[in-house]
Image (spheres, rainbow, N blue to C red):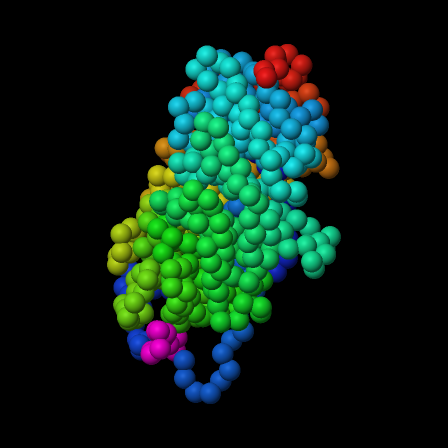
Amino acid sequence: MDGSSEAPTSGLTDGSGGSFQGSGATGNGSPAAGGSSGSGGTTNLSPSGSGGTSEPPPPPPPEKELETAYETPVATDRYVWTANPTTGKVALISADDFSVRLAEAGNAPTTVAALPGHDEDAAIVLNAGSDDATVLRLGADGVIKSQMLQTHAGANAVDVSPSGKWAVIWSNADLEDASKLDPTDGLQDVTVAKLDDDPVTTTILTVGYRPSAVSFDDQEAHAFFVTAPGMTVIDLGDAPHPDRDVLLTDDPVSDQAARDVSVTPDGAYAVVRLDGQKTLGFVDLGTGTRDTVTLPDYVTDLDLSADGKQAFAVTGGALVVVPVPPGDADPSTFARASADGEVGRSVTLSPDTSLALLYSNATADQYLGILTGGGAWSTYEARAVDLKAPVQAAFAAPDGRHGITFQTPATGSTKEGAFSIVSAQLDRAPKIIGTDAPPTALAFASDGAQAVITTRDLGKARYGMYLVELGSLEQTFIQLSSPPLSAGIVGNYGFVAQAHPEGRITFVSLTDASQRTLTGFELAAKVTQ
């Protein structure tokens, strides 16, 4: 499923509804049997067990995409970057010696994005109060170089291309309160900046109505905006400009609120899932041609492999691996994986797609399917585990050996939340931890060995963080004195930024769990122009 950030908590405390157990999954790794090939660019696979004239069952309730709510703050190789919208400053905190530098930004700096691909640590900061952005670069001499870029009014998001060459500043409709938007508020302005030594802001561009996501192709020749009507493709050349609009479905008006769109890394295809539909759409972004594949049941979630050559669709509680593009492939040959005892509706994949975690949060479901495969997924191992409390989100570690779930309280529990540590090894039971405050943020170490989890209950003033050793399934709790806002890992330290009028951040060693908290760093640090 598939700056400073505060994780939204809407939908995380809904413990109503029955258990969402499943049955009928074989878990033997064999491809789904049966099916037939259709015509006209559409391939069909009939659901097994169908027959007679009975009406098909209604689609399941939509799953909630909650993983993206738990974003980590911005960290580069050696520094944590945090913006203070009240003072207009950005703090750079060293993970080597905990020294602090301050840089002036614009009015009300909010979103911060790291700039990869540069010799020095660098970031771009979006200033919500002054319709501009600040590019900050920390040189080897310790001097911060600051450059201002004018943006369009009302920008609330910034995305940076993988090499750090381009920054796209835009207005994400998903970050706005829809009830406060006028129907004429299209949020269609986009600012594109080429981040050379002297960044140049292009003329403001226009994309489709209410964009909700943006991605770049591998060559960084194009940016792709998912919008309400479809997709706008931006040509990132010497003079960036909108190249074309592409329709993603046959009915863009009705489908726009229920689409899940993924773009392949080469920018060749968009893969489209619709709530309440049994089809996957494949859109050739060069020609606009649309093909579909029909799967046995409603498709409730969709992820792509890192190379974009495989689509992992959740249908009927099972994971089906679909080639991208599907061409004339017979869907009965698609690899299919499931876990006995669990009908998952959502999937989280490890980066190498060797681990898949299946679960459902549309109703209160305490079961998790743990599937390990890889490659073509023609063979796999699977098991379902009972985590005792409803699963809300699942996260796979970068190495594909472990996962973590966030959960709401179980019926009769005295705890305010829970999380579980699960292993991909079939002979290891998951470890379930009840928490005195709901889990709110998560960050993995790049090697997948450790993780940092924050918990927060504002009403009861309970704040904390857990340092998790994934290999041993052990965790260390550290109480915090201020509400955690976000978490991350930099160097050999986990860190938690906290709400405090003078700035507060706690570092925890990944080696021995020793702690260091910095408070009031805005008062102690020198402002660097």
Q: In which quarter of the image is residue 469?
A: top left
- What's the residue at 46%, 18% (across, down)? 139
Judged left or right of residue 50, residue 432 is: right
- Whether residue 178 appears in magenta in the rendering, the answer is no
- Note whether residue 144 is visible: yes
Residue 210: percent from left, percent from top: 60, 55
- What's the residue at 36%, 33% (across, down)? 447
Judged left or right of residue 109, residue 46 is: left
Residue 151: percent from left, percent from top: 60, 39
Residue 94: percent from left, percent from top: 50, 18
Vertical placement of residue 241 versus 476, above or below: below
Residue 371: percent from left, percent from top: 36, 52
Q: Is the magenta stretch mostly helix, strand or loop?
A: loop
Q: Nearer the viewer, residue 354 or 210?
A: 210
Q: Give the range drawn in magenta.
A: 38-49
Disc count in the image? 0
- What's the residue at 41%, 39% (across, down)? 162
Q: Nearer the viewer, residue 252 or 194?
A: 194
Q: Quadrant of residue 417?
A: top right
Toward the bottom, the furthest residue is 53
- Note whether residue 396 is visible: no
Vertical placement of residue 260 versus 116, above or below: below
Vertical placement of residue 438 versus 87, above or below: below
Judged left or right of residue 90, residue 95 is: left
Quadrant for the C terminus in the image: top right
- Whether residue 40 appears in magenta in the rendering, the answer is yes
